[in-house]
Amino acid sequence: MFPQFFFGYCALMIVASGLLAISLRNPVHCVLMVLVLFFHMAGLYLTLNAEFLAAVQIIVYAGAILVLYLFVLFLVSLREELHLTAFVPNAWLGRIIATGLAVGLIATIPAFTLGEKGVWTVDAIRQVTHTKALGQELFATYLLPFEIAGLILLVALIGGLVLARRDQGGGESDSASGGTAGDAGPEPVADCREVGR
Amino acid sequence: MIQTAAVTWTALEPILPELLLVGIGVLLIGCDLFIPRQRQVLPWLTVVGCATALLMILGARPTSAFGGMFLADGYAMVFKAICLGAVILTTLISEQFWQTVDGRQGEYYSLLIFSLVGMLLMASAGDLMVLYLGLELMALPIYALVGMHKRDGRTSEAAVKYFLTGAFASALLLFGMSLLYGLTGTTDIGRIAEAAAAMNVAANPALLAALGLLLAGLCFKVAVAPFHLWTPDVYEGAPTLVTALMSIGPKAAGFAIFGRVVFYGLPGLQDHWGPILAVLALLTMAVGNITALCQQSLKRMLAYSSIAHAGYALLGLVAGTEEGMAATMAYLAVYLFMNLGAFAVLILLAAPGQCRESLDDCKGLAGKHPVVAALMLVFLFSLTGIPPTGGFIGKFYLLKAAFVAGYPLTVVGAVLFSAISAFFYLRVVRLMYMSEADHNACLSCSPGMRAVLGVCLAGVLGLGFFPGPVLGWIVAALAGS
């Protein structure tokens, strides 16, 4: 009983804080909502017996990346809001589609059947410990995806530099837009929020 | 005792072209940093690296590596050749382009190469993880390249729009993949096909939901209506050179993963995705061709035309047969030449300080520069699909494949919209040949530009007159994979 209750609590909090993060007007409040979201994500990992991932989620995301987001917010002083004209002017169309999608997806849940299980059962992981199992999989089976992810980080770094750098002899107005799109790299979440308002 | 992965020469051999390109990308950063005076080396290094990778890929035997995560089969080879061709041709034009817009171009080439590596990985992906990571590796540098030329106000807007829609599409795609993984217990595309075949499809709406989300994400990436809304703004706002690349390279790679997921991964669900894609293809052709009619900007018109061409290329996937897949590949190969040719002429028209992207700028081009006008004429005829150009042959095979697979109404629609497209393509021809020029434009043509125009002309006409060898090669590559 308790696991179901805990899962329901985490899931509700994730949805609620996610909604608040994109609808609050003060950017700092938005980032703090994302922090709440990350903590509950870690809670979800705990229900899945993935303690290592939960710890990493808190250390890396809540600890490091959110602080970076806050720094970005302080550096790019968002005095005036950015307004983009929407692709589809009527917001209700989007809301109806989103609700329809949500209802459709929820309706498919009863039909969901789990596929075949992999080699790493809970017992097998308990025998070799999380970190070791994760490392072994990451550097043996999933070596190629791991290396590609490294390459993506490099590209994000270069891309961020290109966008954030002021044009030589260019106008001052570039810097604001360059800054927001500059950390476009690995974490789209905060960026979407900053720009999409 | 931890076993380490056997990273030996034989394990790395299939992925060598990609490794070479990564090396070139890092070398390009180094060159830009340490020998800034010799900046003219960069495009040549890029071209030489890409050409070497192309030769290596064409010469390789079909293999797989990393436990089936990386497939170097014939299917991947064709798409890789198209992507590499797109990057080589746009790099040859780049010198001329950066001279006219007078921008800083240091990181352009390394970002381009990293994006290319992403495209190649997408084409070779045998596992959903590699597929997704390749997609992100392809997309991230392009977001940066779109926003690179910051003095033009439109580019920042285009970059932001592209980034947001791209991230959204990735989310849809990931959601679909996670559902698929939960249902089948594997991310390997071949094993997903087996597991999905064993399942009772009609009774499992969860699998259909996964398919729907995957289709939506993939359609975003190749700009198929109704997921095309980002395309015109982004294509118009991006630097013309990047637009030229985006309209072919990422699109071909997108079709590569599209085919890999629906054609190889979910063949059992063809009764479901076939009709959906047929409707989407018709809608895309309608939206692209009809909206292009009322465009005043040549660049924006080409953007809508690229949406319409995504609709045509989709017809081969709709068919769901090997012939259909081969027709899509052949069409993308023809599209590479004709579309890049048209964009090359657009870049050629631009002068320092003026972008000259509107239709009026083509007025009287034939009187001043008969050769350029004649080239544009050939490319536009090919985009319309008038014989004896390559565009006609490409469209012919696509329509034939869709017709044989049992979609006659879609084929009729495609022909009708193709006829509509003649209006706006040929309007440019009319302006070039039958109007008087408003202003005196003198065009300068760099050697790279000449080479690209020559290659594109040869490609369009060559594929039009002798389509046999290329089509035979594609069919053989597909059959051998």
Image (cartoon, rainbow, N blue to C red):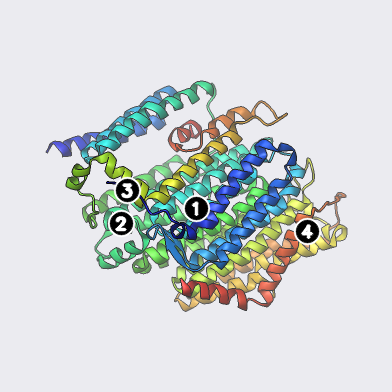
The secondary element bearing badge 1 is classed as helix
Q: To which chain does the residue with label 2 belong?
A: B
Query: Are the residues flagged by discs 3 and 4 from a single subunit?
Result: no
Which residue is identified by label 3?
A: A137
Whole-angstrom CA distance, mark 4 to mark 2, is 49 Å
**Residue type (three-letter) at the residue carrying disc 2:** Thr
Between circles 1 and 3, the one closer to the viewer is 3
Determine crowd level at label 3: few under 14, some 14-19, many 20+ residues with C-alpha closer than 10 A: few
Give residue A172's position: percent from left, percent from top.
66, 25
The secondary element bearing badge 4 is classed as helix
Whole-angstrom CA distance, mark 1 to mark 4, is 32 Å
Q: Earlier in the sequence, mark 1 or mark 4?
A: 1
Which residue is identified by label 4?
A: B450
**Residue type (three-letter) at the residue carrying disc 1:** Lys
Whole-angstrom CA distance, mark 2 to mark 3, is 14 Å
Which residue is identified by label 2?
A: B186
Left or right relative to B370: residue B33: left
Determine crowd level at label 2: few under 14, some 14-19, many 20+ residues with C-alpha closer than 10 A: many
Give residue B186's position: percent from left, percent from top.
30, 56
Q: Earlier in the sequence, mark 2 or mark 1?
A: 2
Which residue is identified by label 1?
A: B221
Query: Are the residues flagged by discs 4 and 2 from a single subunit?
Result: yes
